[in-house]
Every structure is written in C-alpha cells, then in structure tokens.
Amino acid sequence: MHVDVIVLAGGRSSRVDGVAKASLVVGGATLLQRAVVAGLGAIAVGAAGAAPGVGAEPGGGGRLVVVGPDDETTALGDVLRDPRLAGGMLLRARETPPFGGPAAAIAAGLAALRRSPEPTPGRGTAVGPFVAVIACDHPRVEHALPLVLAALRDRAEESIDAWMAQGEDPPPLALVAQNARITHDESTLRDQHQGRLQPLLAVYRRASLDRRVNALRRERPGGLDGASVRQLIDGLALLPVRVPTADTADIDTWADAARFGAQPPTASDAARPEVEPPTASDAARFGAQPPTASDAARPGVERPTASAAARFAAQPTTASDAVLQRPTTIGGSS
C-alpha cells in the first residue's frame, strides 16, 4: 500500500501571537517532529504490505513533504537525522502565495510529489494512489493517523469495490478522522450523525485531490489563494473514521496549548542532540525499542524500524479502535 504524506506547517499562528505552532514542544518533541514521525510510521506501515487491492504494488514505499517556511528546519531538529529520510524521502515545499491557506498548501505538496517521484528499483518510478494529509498542530497525530490507515487497510477496499462497480472511474474517496464525541452542528464541517470531521487528518485518493485542485483553480476567482480545505474537498465522498476526541484535537490557541502542556522552544531544546519520542506509549505504538546499556549515556529512544512497522501494521483493528462510517459528501459532485 503506497502512501505518501503531506505535512502542513505553514500557517500564520495568529492566535498564538505568531509563534510558529510547528515549533511548540509537547512531551520533549516539537509538533512538527511529532507529525513527521507519524508520517514516517504511515509510510513504513504502507511499505510493510496491505490487503490485496488496496493501493499500489506490494512493498511500495512513499515520500513525505513538509509544506511551510524554510525556517521550519529548526523545528524538525533531530528528525532530519532519521535514516529513513535519506535518498530523497523528505521533500520541502511552500504554498503560493506564502500563507495562502490549506488548499494552496495541499496543492504545493501534491506538486512536490509529482516533481519527485520515488525511485523504485527495477520498476522505474512509482506514484502511489493515496496521500495522507496532516496538519502539524495535532499533538496526538501519532495515535489518530494509524486508525485512519487501519480503516484504509482493513475495510476501505469493500467500499472501493462497491463504488467501482458503478462506473469506470475510481471513486473520489477520502478517509477522514472524525471526532467521536462532538454532537451535530450545522455551522461546521460534520458528519450526518455525529462528530466533527478533521479533513487535515485524513487519507485521500490522490486523483481526487488533483481533480479538486484543478477545479478550484478554474472556478474560484482567487484560485487557491485563501481557499479553505472545505472548499477543496467539496463534493468528495468521505468515509468518516471515528477516532477518540483527544486524538483529533488540535492546538489553535494558548488555551489549547496549555491543555497539552505545549511550550515554545527554548535554547536548551535547540542544543539537545536528540529528542525523545513524545511518550513511552507512543514509542511502543511505533515499535521503538527500549534503550540498551550502551544507550544509557545519551537521551532518546531508537526510531522505528521496518520490522517494527510490520509489527505495528499487523495489530488488529477492533470496532472500539476505528469505526468506519457510511460514506458522506460535502457539497455537490466534483
């Protein structure tokens, strides 16, 4: 299952006094680091294999694009030394114009993926059918994203097959994390039954996003500049995946930051050679190994490995873990 990842890190952060949310530190890691590590986990799980018919050829990998200012390199920190980012795995992009909004940022990420197809030994280049889109301000993204991927891996193929029978073109599929506890409210993007959808914590069919990007450029007077993510996904058929409320929460204000213990980076953070994964449970979720005696002298926990990703991918998904809801749409057909 070939999954590429787009991490959005380019907002103005106006409600936190202009402090780059990507650089806020939660549990010893910046929000951007947490998002990138979650994205790498998603790519590793995809490369470990999937149910037949879901995605590209078995063993297909993926790439990760960080869309945001160049100065976000500081927020990436020690993640840049992760060996899985070698060989062109990590791409950088910037939306046009800068601070042009999430739709423009997603378009920039898609363009970066098209320009830099992943080298696939013996098979030329591969461009995967799915792309995960995650905003860097979700402090528990490493808990939420695996549930969305599990729904894609274990259940989505049934809906894909059913929709494919209706026509020759692939359906405009997206699996979107859904807050499981918020009640219905017509004023925001929500499912027909309950729960707020999180379109920046989702996996989309790449062709669907490409079509919507092109349509929005044509139809909207300002093109993508200032367009919302809701406008971008208007008309897509969405499969909500219920995720615990705490795991879908994002940080928009200082009050949100306080709830998660998020702090601006300090000089000691910048000087530290390695950053620990957010928590021990997070490390276990991605199969990170505990430190050995030789590691005791330095901080940090080993990064996930391919075998760890395979173990993580093999974890069963239960109804309490991820609930795939019936399809819904936002707006009309695209």
Image (cartoon, helix red, strand yellow):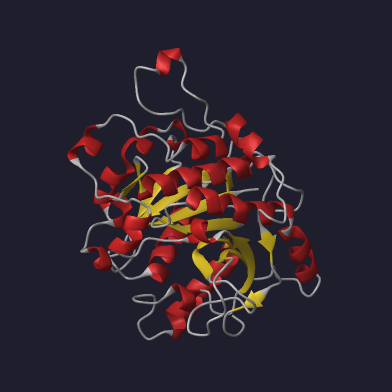
Residue 68 location in percent, x, y?
A: 32, 57
User: Residue at image x 57%, y 84%?
Assistant: 331
Count of numbered badges drawn on the protein: 0
Residue 59 location in percent, x, y?
A: 65, 39
Whether residue 55 is visible here, answered yes or no, is no
Q: Nearer the viewer, residue 101 or 117?
A: 101
Q: Is residue 62 left or right of residue 326?
A: left
Residue 1 location in percent, x, y?
A: 65, 48
Give the quarter of the figure containing the C terminus: bottom right
Residue 28 location in percent, x, y?
A: 34, 40
Residue at the far top in the pictured view: 294
Whether residue 295 is visible here, answered yes or no, is yes
State which quadrant residue 234 falls in. bottom right
User: Residue at image x 75%, y 48%?
Assistant: 51
Q: Is residue 194 above or below residue 16?
A: below
Q: Is residue 68 left or right of residue 317?
A: left
User: Residue at image x 33%, y 43%?
Assistant: 76
Q: Nearer the viewer, residue 43 or 151?
A: 151
